[in-house]
Image (spheres, rainbow, N blue to C red):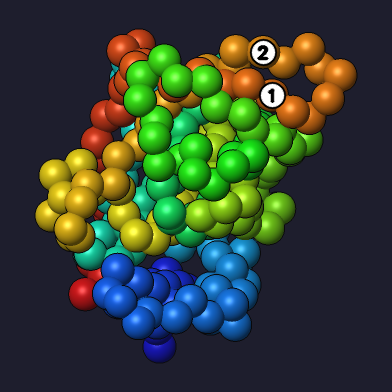
């Protein structure tokens, strides 16, 4: 019998295979099925155990990352954030994303671009107008969080109770070298420029990759997906 992570992987492939090829049609029904499978995933399903969480606490990096699967259409990975650490504010260009907390508690601040054209010209120092969504506190008993190419495409994630582990399914993958498509798909970082708290309209500024935030790679201990 297929494991829960195998079922999730197969559904992610069904939903996103060919997503960078002209003629691909996104199916909300397939995405909904994927979200439902994501909601069921636990730490055990991706072999995140106490030893691993203890290791994350003891090592120096603010975050550890486990690559579960990647091809030209999807990335499946687990991220484990140490207590008090914040994964800096970043975007997911033209991507869909699902995030399922499987251990600990996180706070997520999400933002939506006011103008879709803004996301295409994100040179350093540029000011971007966004809508800020109400922060959410998410734990392993909560359903997966969803972002789309338009909605909540920018977020920052803070570990309130850690280590906090979450499973990510992203499509298409980030692609620094342009190996999966005609052009690269980069992660851009932001900081809040202006937020007086009186409105959900906020200004962000495009920043450099934060130098004080880095990630340590851990091997996936589950059965390889292939
Ligand atoms: Fe993200």
Q: Residue at x 86, y 19 (%)?
A: 198
Q: Residue at x 30, y 68 (%)?
A: 20
Quadrant in which the C terminus is drawn: bottom left
10 Å crowding of disc 2: few (<14), some (14-19), many (20+): few
Q: Residue at x 27, y 74 (%)?
A: 21
Q: Quadrant of residue 105?
A: top right
Is label 2 within 8 A of ligand 1 (CB to nearest ligand atom)? no
Q: Give the SS element for disc 1.
A: strand
Comparing 87 with 48, the one in front is: 87
**Residue under numbered circle 1:** 202
Is label 1 within 8 A of ligand 1 (CB to nearest ligand atom)? no
Comparing 114 with 148, the one in front is: 114
Q: Quadrant of residue 214?
A: top left
Q: Is residue 10 visible?
A: no
Q: Quadrant of residue 13?
A: bottom left
Q: Is residue 38 above or below residue 102?
A: below
Comparing 141 with 54, the one in front is: 141
Q: Does the CB distance between marks 2 and 1 fall below 8 Å?
A: yes
10 Å crowding of disc 1: few (<14), some (14-19), many (20+): many
Q: Residue at x 69, y 24 (%)?
A: 202
> Residue 61: horizontal and vertical position, in percent?
33, 20
Residue 194: mark in rendering: 2
> Residue 154: horizontal and vertical position, in percent?
54, 38
Q: Give the SS element for disc 2.
A: strand
Residue 12: mark in rendering: none
Label 2 and label 1: CA atoms lie apart by: 6 Å
Q: Is residue 177 visible?
A: yes
> Residue 66: horizontal and vertical position, in percent?
31, 45
Q: Is residue 34 left or right of residue 199?
A: left
> Residue 169: horizontal and vertical position, in percent?
43, 58
Q: Which residue is outermost to the bottom?
A: 1
């Amino acid at each position: 019998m297929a494991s829960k992570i195998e079922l999730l992987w197969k559904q992610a492939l069904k939903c996103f295979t060919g997503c960078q090829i002209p003629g691909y049609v996104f199916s909300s029904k397939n995405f909904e099925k994927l979200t439902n499978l994501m909601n069921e995933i636990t730490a055990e399903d991706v072999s995140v155990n106490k030893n691993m969480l203890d290791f994350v606490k003891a090592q120096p990096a603010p975050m550890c990352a486990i690559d579960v699967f990647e091809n030209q259409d999807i990335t499946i990975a687990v991220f484990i954030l140490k207590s008090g650490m914040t994964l800096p504010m970043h975007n997911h260009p033209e991507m869909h994303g699902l995030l399922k907390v499987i251990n600990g508690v996180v706070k997520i601040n999400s933002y939506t671009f006011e103008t879709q054209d803004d996301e295409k010209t994100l040179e350093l120092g540029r000011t971007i107008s966004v809508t800020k969504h109400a922060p959410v506190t998410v734990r392993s008993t909560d359903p997966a969080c969803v972002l789309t190419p338009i909605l909540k495409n920018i977020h920052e994630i803070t570990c309130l109770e850690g280590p906090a582990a979450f499973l990510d399914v992203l499509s298409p993958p980030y692609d620094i070298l342009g190996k999966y498509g005609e052009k690269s798909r980069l992660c851009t970082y932001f900081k809040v420029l202006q937020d007086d708290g009186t409105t959900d309209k906020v200004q962000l500024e495009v920043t450099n990759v934060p130098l004080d935030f880095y990630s340590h790679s851990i091997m996936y201990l589950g059965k390889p997906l292939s």
